[in-house]
Amino acid sequence: MVVKLGLIGCGAIARTHVINIKKNIKNAKIVAIYDLYLTAAQKLIEDTKIESKICYSIDELINENIDAVMICSRNDAHLEPILKAIHHNKYVFTEKPLVDNAKDCKKIIAAEISGNKRLIQVGFMRRYDPFYQEMKTEMTSGNIGEPLMGYCRHFTTHPATSYFKTENMINDAFIHEIDILHWLFEDRYQSIQVQFARQNSLNINEQLYDPQIVTIKFKKGAIVNTYLSQNSQYGYDVMCQIIGEKGIVQLPDMPSIETRYNQNISRHIDKDWTKRFDLAYKLEIKDFINRVAREMPLHGPSSWDGYIAAVTADAAIQSQKNQKPVQISYDKKPDFY
Amino acid sequence: MVVKLGLIGCGAIARTHVINIKKNIKNAKIVAIYDLYLTAAQKLIEDTKIESKICYSIDELINENIDAVMICSRNDAHLEPILKAIHHNKYVFTEKPLVDNAKDCKKIIAAEISGNKRLIQVGFMRRYDPFYQEMKTEMTSGNIGEPLMGYCRHFTTHPATSYFKTENMINDAFIHEIDILHWLFEDRYQSIQVQFARQNSLNINEQLYDPQIVTIKFKKGAIVNTYLSQNSQYGYDVMCQIIGEKGIVQLPDMPSIETRYNQNISRHIDKDWTKRFDLAYKLEIKDFINRVAREMPLHGPSSWDGYIAAVTADAAIQSQKNQKPVQISYDKKPDFY
Amino acid sequence: MVVKLGLIGCGAIARTHVINIKKNIKNAKIVAIYDLYLTAAQKLIEDTKIESKICYSIDELINENIDAVMICSRNDAHLEPILKAIHHNKYVFTEKPLVDNAKDCKKIIAAEISGNKRLIQVGFMRRYDPFYQEMKTEMTSGNIGEPLMGYCRHFTTHPATSYFKTENMINDAFIHEIDILHWLFEDRYQSIQVQFARQNSLNINEQLYDPQIVTIKFKKGAIVNTYLSQNSQYGYDVMCQIIGEKGIVQLPDMPSIETRYNQNISRHIDKDWTKRFDLAYKLEIKDFINRVAREMPLHGPSSWDGYIAAVTADAAIQSQKNQKPVQISYDKKPDFY
Amino acid sequence: MVVKLGLIGCGAIARTHVINIKKNIKNAKIVAIYDLYLTAAQKLIEDTKIESKICYSIDELINENIDAVMICSRNDAHLEPILKAIHHNKYVFTEKPLVDNAKDCKKIIAAEISGNKRLIQVGFMRRYDPFYQEMKTEMTSGNIGEPLMGYCRHFTTHPATSYFKTENMINDAFIHEIDILHWLFEDRYQSIQVQFARQNSLNINEQLYDPQIVTIKFKKGAIVNTYLSQNSQYGYDVMCQIIGEKGIVQLPDMPSIETRYNQNISRHIDKDWTKRFDLAYKLEIKDFINRVAREMPLHGPSSWDGYIAAVTADAAIQSQKNQKPVQISYDKKPDFY
């Protein structure tokens, strides 16, 4: 069976998914697309040469003969198509975040539960990364004991966009750590604090404070510090190191040839995320499509994970205001998830 | 355009290619298959659920409406379908070796030249591996100067098959080094010598001498030693280290999480080749299909490379008899390649 | 010239220094020793076979024909012999800390300044470690830009002693980071905060909270987190990673043979500090002795550094009480240092 | 007890030993020195400020009140002082080689055996290197099984001297591998072959062929290739990798800080051997002095090891003439060793 997809939002990340699906996913086809700006939809079709119908409203798209909706629109425009898709019993893959506030997350959760089928997958692709998965396996093995502390680095060579602001450090970068850390630790967050380290003078963006350090505490007491920068200059660098009662487990650097030359032993670091997470981006879509094709419940990051991320990110942004710790409280997790 | 493929030979490697094409290559379809044993063809279709016509002869398959032939049959059964495909002006992807002797390689070269179009690609997938490509780029940069020496390791945890013999160490393992080393060094081989090191007592195969060391000399004087074992026990391990006038460049180990536990810092090594060369296998097919789709001349390992490999492997097998060096001579390289 | 030393305090660390001097330092001799407990002094002589006079008071020892005093007594017993040594114009090597409170540090500083000669060296041996020195050189080179953040790990396999308490984590472990970090950053501390992470259930010492994280902020804004544990179980592990505006510099792991065995690539980590800091311990004494021999002013960690450490450690211990940040203020640094 | 040494030969390596003894070895003193050129002896005293008597002949020196002779003279001048020292029952530390030919080695062996005490230690310092020792321990553990193959690199940034010739590659460089490999493998050499790889155009020394590859075969069948260069340009680099039936063990690179800067992860390699083997040079002398001090039989590389090295080096130099393998045969090893 070929999964028929309707795409909402035709920007940069949509393009990445479209090209991936077109090139690599045999059992999926984007049959309908919609963007608030018609020209964006037209341009996407022109550039990627997909054969899709352009729709003029979300309702029109949802009512097409599609199996699933893929949402790549602005963060504040996710709610409507998600609820409508659930209403029509269609699967949803939505780019992170689920929606941009906790209240709307709860509406989605309520709707999904009432339909009694896991229809939503949020685009936290790190869970599909083989190295994070190896880490989780190692943590589960008991070799390093219970996790006590963590140290993460999430560095981008240069800011993704010129309008990347202090808040985006949470919503666009740290959001990935929010999702992956509670998945790795299997524990809830208790409090969060964002501190601004000495400012990088090479950061030319006045609306961005760079670098920042986020300290997160879990209910069971574990503490994780994440160092965030969009101006590392030297390369794209994601590190996660978990320190347990008996040992440490950490992510590898990406492989590169090693040279010995001029009294140095050197390897390359890449400038962007492509080599590091390309596979994870592909695997999250493959898993989504395969499960839709077989009409199975989804298995990736859920609406509940989207809710956790929204609440936690809100607290982090609140902490950015005075750099003090902010307590976090979540609803009780429904048995459904 | 979707490339229509005819597959000849339906064994293990065929299965790998079929699954890859089915899952990952959107612009290709296997429309016809043939195997000397009808049941093998039937089983392949049953297992992989491809929709292909079963042909009862090579001729029948070649005459189907196909753009290219993919050859996965026994090494001594490559010649006929390749020549017929050239005759019908169809592209050919053939698993290594091109054919199993130098004389037949020359027939193919002659046929291909007379058609005046590069129609043949041999499955030396290492050229598509990003790390070998990085090595070549680094060597071309001049940073390490001219290449003077090399050290390679080609280790398999356990033999691929129970009937893997002393000769297979050349034809099935070292053949990859034959292809990649002259591509890296951009030089011809002058002589080759195979020596048997102390035998591994864990090698239970009486027809296999393991390990072996192959010493290869290039025309310009560079010497490369390749250590070959099918019984490393500890893992699949391919190393290539090139020593130039000013420095060294070498392949990386594959990435894995790093643990600190029990007074050890450890990483995993894989048991088989999958993680190491999976991408290269995919990329060689993608490149082949894309070029066929656009009717471009092929760009991967050519019939000439197949001829080089055949002559060199013959010399290596000859050297296995008394472990003495064997001089190698090749025909003049046609301008066509 | 052979430097004549008087040793005060004959415990474990004294023994290490005595053996080192006896074996490796040709131009020094311990001619007199004193311990509050006569038997400790007698046992040291018996065990190490040094030819030293046993003194019955600090005054007696100071008045011997000695060039320098080496202080290895309890932290709260450093003040008297240091002041007396300064009074007699004798050099002092004292184990860290200088003294156990800031007020007494100031007395020593005042006395030293009034004598107008740098006579005191504090045993912060990390400054003599080649790798910390390489780090400082790299930071000074400008390659990584201004330092913005840091991440340190200071892990011991098991607690040094059974009476190692929560406070000792600062006074006996973190004190080394206090000294080395302001030396590396060339900046003063602004505030300090100690947080207790999830407790390690393998920590059997009820008076020790383990692990702890110390967050230190510099005047210029840089933030450094140090992870402290006396129960790492897996080995002795000291890491220091400084993140600058353009890059990172970090300490190496200690070298060990690398094995490939059973699908693992492994190196050893040592159980204790010996291999890591043995050289630094030797070099600090060599430097001290050589400068005394030539009657040069001392160059190693000074009384002022001792004062910085005392004030900072006090603030850290204060923070341990409620895990809140504590502001730090220092006197103005005298021009003398 | 302080060991009284007589030094013969006052060149560069003598100077290294003298400074080491003066600075680091408390229980040894160089009381007498001799050099064929009086000015060399005078200059050594002047530069190092040792208090030693200058002797005018080997006989005079041997007859001084000394416990041991240290020989640092030219390779062809070792025999006489060694035999005389044995005759006077004095210990001998001699720089490698023992003597420059196998026949004279046998004379020394005969003399030493007739005295019935191991008095001779040859300066193959690698046996004192902690990493070679770790390798041997690992090999003995059985973890990697029996050793089957080896790969070594012995690279110097630039030639040690301007008159370093093709032969010196064996006598001054490879001689270390000769000693360490039979110690690691615990097996005798069967044959040796030297091959010249493509010449390094940056080698400006016309009397030196650089690089060379030495292939050594052991009686039990193991094969080791050693790559030799005095013109690596990039640094001093000694690698030894032993491949066993179940795994690999190899030497580490020397530690250095790691930087991430400008899309590179880098470590330094040193230009010369100091950091790599400084400790081994110190430990071999310490061990020698300590055993002399206690009048114990020596334990380091023996006259027999010197003989093995001499015979093997001769065979290697013979092979350099036509690059063919040369069979090696040794006398039966006396029970004495």
Image (spheres, coloured by chain):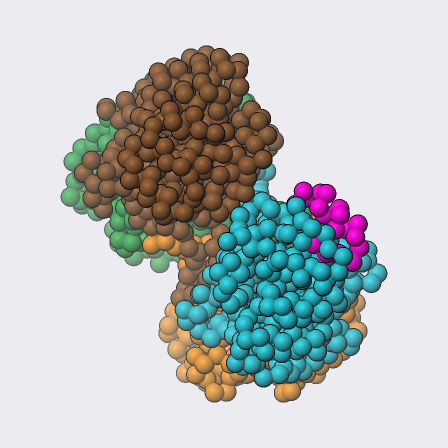
Chain colours: A brown, B cyan, C green, D orange
Q: Position of residue C270 (x, y in %)?
A: 54, 43
**Residue B279 appears left or right of B155:** left
Q: Position of residue B126 (x, y in %)?
A: 57, 61
Query: Looking at the picture, does residue B239 appear above or below residue B309?
Result: above
Query: Looking at the picture, does residue D8 appear above or below residue A300?
Result: below
Picture quadrant where residue D235 is located = bottom left
Give yes or no for residue D125 being in the magenta stretch.
no
Which part of the image, by quadrant, shows the N terminus of chain C?
A: bottom left
Query: Looking at the picture, does residue B261 appear above or below residue A254?
Result: above
Give yes or no for residue B49 being in the magenta stretch.
yes
Q: Which residues are magenta?
A: B33-50
Q: Position of residue A313 (x, y in %)?
A: 34, 25
Q: Position of residue C257 (x, y in %)?
A: 58, 53
Viewer-closest of A249 and A31: A31
Query: Looking at the picture, does residue B263 appear above or below residue B120?
Result: above
Picture quadrant where residue A146 is located = top right
User: What's the residue at 48%, 72% (across, down)?
Assistant: B244
User: What's the residue at 58%, 77% (across, down)?
Assistant: B113
Which part of the image, by quadrant, shows the C terminus of chain C?
A: top left
User: What's the residue at 73%, 55% (across, down)?
Assistant: B55
Viewer-closest of C313 and B102: B102
User: What's the residue at 56%, 24% (across, down)?
Assistant: A297
Query: Is residue D320 something that shows in the picture?
Result: yes
Viewer-closest of C316 and A83: A83
